[in-house]
Structures are given as structure tokens and as C-alpha cells.
Amino acid sequence: MGRKRTPQPEEWSGAAYIALTLRLHGAPPVREAQARRKVGRLSTAQFAGSSAERDGSAMRLLVVEDNTDLAELLLQGLARHGFAADVMTTAGDAEEAVSSAHYAAMILDLGLPDEDGLLLLKRLRKQGVQMPVLALTARGSVSDRVEGLRAGADDYLVKPFAVEELAARLQALMRRPGDLLGEQLTVGDVSLDLQSRQVTVDGKPEPFSAREVDLLEILMRRAGRVVQKSFVEDHLFGLNAPAGSNAVEVAVHRLRRRLQGLAARAAVHTVKGVGYFIAETKA
């Protein structure tokens, strides 16, 4: 008989996934991150050495999940697929987070301790919140899925699930017309491959830092349009940005200097008191 194959982490799910991951990898206990908003939260920034930290991702997600073990594993799995995320464990905290920060998409558990997730979703849609929402739940009947989609969910994933499928569904949601995910962005002679995170200037690969790539992506997705400083801050740092810091200004300054040093035909501009934009510069 052949040797029994050991399941890969992304094939584990539910209680077995949690138990195996915690036992084999010694995952740290979940804890609330100290940040500038008075909301309980956890984020990918807590996982040193994760792919989100190394490679960066401007596509920040909001994960609403009250099971803290599962939430922590979700963050680790999403980080491996290049997503940064913040976690809220209640509907109330999630609603506050949505009103305080900008997110590319939401992963919403429907069984929340303070309110049914569908009620939160309906309320957010009535408020005009348009970001893609993937409902994550143990309710797997056809009627449950139909109810979730009618409440405003863009997709529906039943527990247990594979993190790889979750990531693929998120990528598909954000590829839809009007959303922000693409394969390559170009402004002037500067191009960014969103899969490899490689920046090229005039066709030549250049070594940009993870933070520079994040900022470049945010601006290039909205080339020629002013991006508010608060939007940049939320997508670069999420709910972990220190209050009153000049981190955004420093990041913009470094990216601007980097592009200038490479004689790129794209420049970052500041609109005082509003935000920033990138545009092609003429030779």
C-alpha cells in the first residue's frame, strides 16, 4: 500500500483545520491589536513573515468572524494569497469599521453574537455600501443561499471550506466590472504586474519595496484622479495606523523620489489638504 498523504493546510477546514494548525505550527493566541479606533480588531500585520507583509497587498479586506481561532487562521491563509485584512468579531464593530475605513471586499460570517449577519448586510446595502461581500456560513441549504444573495451578498461559501477556494472567489469578485482587481497596471512607462508584484520602468524590472508597490497600486488603479489621504492610509495600514502619524506622507515622499531617480514618465502629485494622484509626465 502507498504511503498515506498528509493533508495540506489549505485542504483542512473547520475544527480539524484549527486543531491541526494550532498544534503543528504553534499559532499564537488571538489578541486585540491596539490601534487608533476604539474597535476590537485583529489584522494580518500580527503575522510576522507572512506573504502579505513581505509582498504587500493594497487590497485590504474586512473579515467579520466571531470564532477567533478561525479568524486567525483565515488571516494567515489570506496573507499567503496576498490579501491584507482586518477582523471584527461583532456586527456592531464591523459596521463601525466600514464607516471608518475603506475596504476592497468583506468576508461576512452570518452567525454573529450580537446580530444576524444578514441584517447587517441589508443595513449596509441600504446605506449605499457597494463593496463586494462574500457570505461565509454553515447554513448550506438552497433557501439559505437564496436568502443571502437576496440580502445583498455577492457570493456564498458554506463551511467547511478550503482557503484556496475562498481566495479564488474573492479574486473573482474583484475582477467584476467596476471593481478594482486587474492583472497589470500602467501609467506612462511604469507598469505593475499584480500577480508577481513586479514593477518595470521603461520595460526594465526595478526593485521597489513592498510599501512602495502597495502605494503605487493604490494610485495607479485611479490614475489621474485624486485619492484621498484617508483612503491611502486605510489601504496601506488598515486599522493599525498610529494616530497623528505622518506615515502616509513619508511613503508618498519615498515613492516620488524613487520614480524621479529612475527618470520614470510617471509622477506622484500632492493636492494639499486632499490627497495624491499619479499621472504620466510628458518627455
Image (cartoon, rainbow, N blue to C red):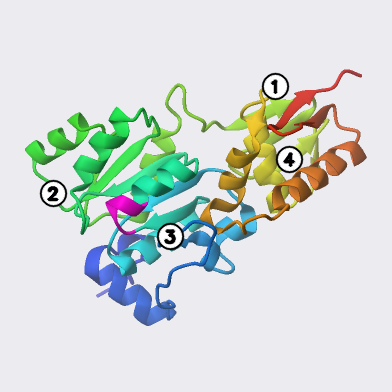
Mark 3 crowd level (few <14, some 14–19, many ≥20, 10 Å Cα): many
| For the residues bearing labels 1 and 3, Cβ distance under 8 angstroms | no
User: What residue sits right under mark 4 in the picture?
Assistant: 199
Q: Is residue 91 magenta?
A: yes
In the image, which is nearer the foreground, mark 1 or mark 3? Answer: 1
Q: Element under label 1?
A: loop
In the image, which is nearer the foreground, mark 1 or mark 2? Answer: 1
Task: Give the main secondary structure of the magenta stretch.
Answer: helix
In the image, which is nearer the foreground, mark 4 or mark 3? Answer: 3
Determine which quarter of the picture holds residue 16: bottom left
Mark 4 residue type: Val
Mark 2 crowd level (few <14, some 14–19, many ≥20, 10 Å Cα): some
Report the span colored magenta: 89-93
Q: How many marks?
A: 4
Mark 3 residue type: Leu
- Examine the rendering and report whether any part of residue 148 can be seen: yes
- Tell me: residue 263, above or below residue 56: above
Mark 1 residue type: Gly
Question: Residue 139 has which mark?
Answer: 2
User: What residue sits right under mark 1 in the picture?
Assistant: 224
Along the horizontal axis of the image, is 146 left or right of 47? left
User: What residue sits right under mark 3 in the picture?
Assistant: 75
Indicate which disc, 1 or 2, sits on the residue closer to the N terminus: 2
